[in-house]
Image: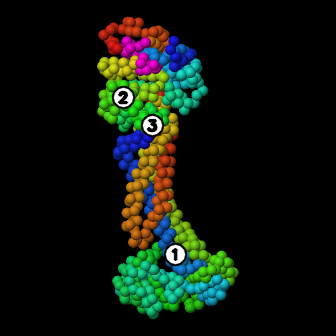
Amino acid sequence: MSEIIIEATGIKKTLGQGAGEVKALRGIDLTLRRGEFTLLMGPSGSGKTTLLLVLGCMLAPSSGTLTVCGMPTSGVDKEGLARIRRDHIGFVFQSYHLFPTLTAAQNVQLALDIRHERGRKAGKRAREALNLVGLAQKADTLPGELSGGEQQRVAIARAFVANPSVILADEPTAALDGNNGRSIMRILADAAHQRERAVLVVTHDPRVIPFADRIVEIEDGLLVDTGSGGPERLHLPKAAAFRP
Amino acid sequence: MSLVPTLASRNLFHDRLRFVATLIGIVFSVVLVMIQMGLFLGFGRMVTTMIDHASADLWVLPKGAKCFEDPSLLDAKLRDKVTSVDGVASVVPLVIGFSDWRLESGETTPVFVVGADLRDGSLRPWNVVEGDVRALSQNGAVIVDRSYYDRLGVSKIGSTAEIRGRHVKVVALTDGIRSFTTTPYVFVDLKYARTYTGTFPDRASDLLVRLKPDADRDTVLKAVRALVGEHEVLTTDEFRSRSRSFWLFGTGAGAALFAGALLGVIVGTVIVAQTLYSSTKDHLSEFATLRAMGSSNGYIYRVIIYQALLNAIIGFVIATAIGTVVVEMTAKSALPIVITPWLIAALFVLTVVMCVASAIGAIVRVVRIDPATVFMR
């Protein structure tokens, strides 16, 4: 059995107060393991993003326990949680969130910079990460001059350049066409399989299913299936899927 | 090297219009403070210019004399008493006072007569650019500054006028001896000064005391104070300080200059704070992304403070260049603006403090960033 990177037990999260109170998560048990590519799927409002925020140490659960790389997160202050994110977690956002005034290489290097990794070595690592996502020739290009797919690849390079144990991605293919979506999923799958990371992708895009080792379904704040995945399990039409 | 300076400078230069507006605010503020403080220094120097150029170790003054221009008089016989004090080398009376100068055209203008014993050299005109100071010992001889040609209706050595109905002739010209009161100084020999100022022969404005080289100043000071009774005895530094204090703070002129400088600081701080806050607000999603990636708050503060520092440095350099031009332009004016290296250093520190303090609002805004917002966009 491979190493557990994130372990969530009995996670509950209530958002809002009084009449506006919503039980977004109602007792989630989930483990993410090294080398495993997991999809978290579910309809809108099912609690996918809330769970991602909790797993990414950006939202404290109302109850339950969360450990990241063996470290419990309960009682840790904001700076401590930021440190856990910095040291162990890489994020990929739906709308890329690149810095428009920095080049692709500088955007990637930023993930090292906040970890106090600077100088030529950091620059070299950033360019190597861009090379791995096929963007070595665009290292000095500003995000505004890149396509959506290229921007998302820069964001992925930024997520894994510091070698985090886990990558959490939120709808990374939502704004991309078929070719770009396939390319992004392949990079993320490689990040899990070849680089021994836990990768969790939140999506409601069924085309990404063929890449998954495991598909976790969430509905009304509860996991309804934590099975081992594959497109056949969801009866997905072959033509609709991104092919690995 | 960290990416903090790169990120800060790109954030700053990205919106050029806002950057220019910020710079204008800083430059306006720093130039205003620089001019106000330069005027303060210039004024401070001008009010003591006669004291600075007098050759005296101690000044015997009428009781309560507030400044060099004070019209109070003392008994000239004190001179003999003070001369007798052990350690005193010489005592020279000074007679000063306002008087009327009648131009050849018949117009009159007020002048400030400075009468000193030329043989003793206690307060001789300086910066003499034409003529000879020794000619001042002639009856009716005066020395004026050439910047007052128009005011005094003279155009060269040999020009004539009247002081209190007495015929006078310009025998030498100085350059740059200007009065902050705008009333021209007119140097005359002591023996004629009383006539021009209407001072009785047994009266003098001040006594300038020079000490022997081996004399202990404090000991002599005590001895002279004990001797002159109700009159005051000050060292040159004390008299300079008292004069400055009177003109700068007693008249409210200094307070007005400081108020202007304070206004400059407030305006600058508000402008920089507003633009930094607005810039930070525009880049909130980037700061939230940094926070989501795990950056410390300190890293984000550094970006904002670096922006503030860049504003400060660029604004200060431009302001200093403008200030230098202003200094050049006012060098020959009635009240020149004086900018010293210390003033420049203090202004730089002030500009940095002003800009960094302005960043507080932006920092407070950033502290409240929820990194989770990056997943909502």
Look at 66% across and 84% down and name the residue there.
B86
Which of the labelled discs sits on residue A140, or is there none? none
Q: Earlier in the sequence, mark 3 or mark 2?
A: 3
Q: List x then y, in percent, for residue A69.
A: 54, 22
Q: Residues under labels 3 and 1: Cα distance? A: 57 Å
Using the image, determine if residue B259 lies above or below residue A228: below
Look at 41% across and 39% down and name the residue there.
B7
Query: Range of the magenta residues?
Result: A191-213
Labels 3 and 2 in the same subunit: yes
Name the residue type under label 3: Arg
Q: Nearer the viewer, residue B375 or B316?
A: B316
Chain hosting mark 2: A
Q: Which residue is mark 1?
A: B52
- Element at badge 3? loop
Q: Which residue is mark 3?
A: A118
A105 drawn magenta = no
Q: List x then y, in percent, for residue B107.
A: 38, 84
Look at 58% across and 23% down and name the residue there.
A72
Badge 2 density bin: few <14, some 14–19, many ≥20, Cα 10 Å: many
- Element at badge 1? helix
Q: Which residue is mark 2?
A: A130
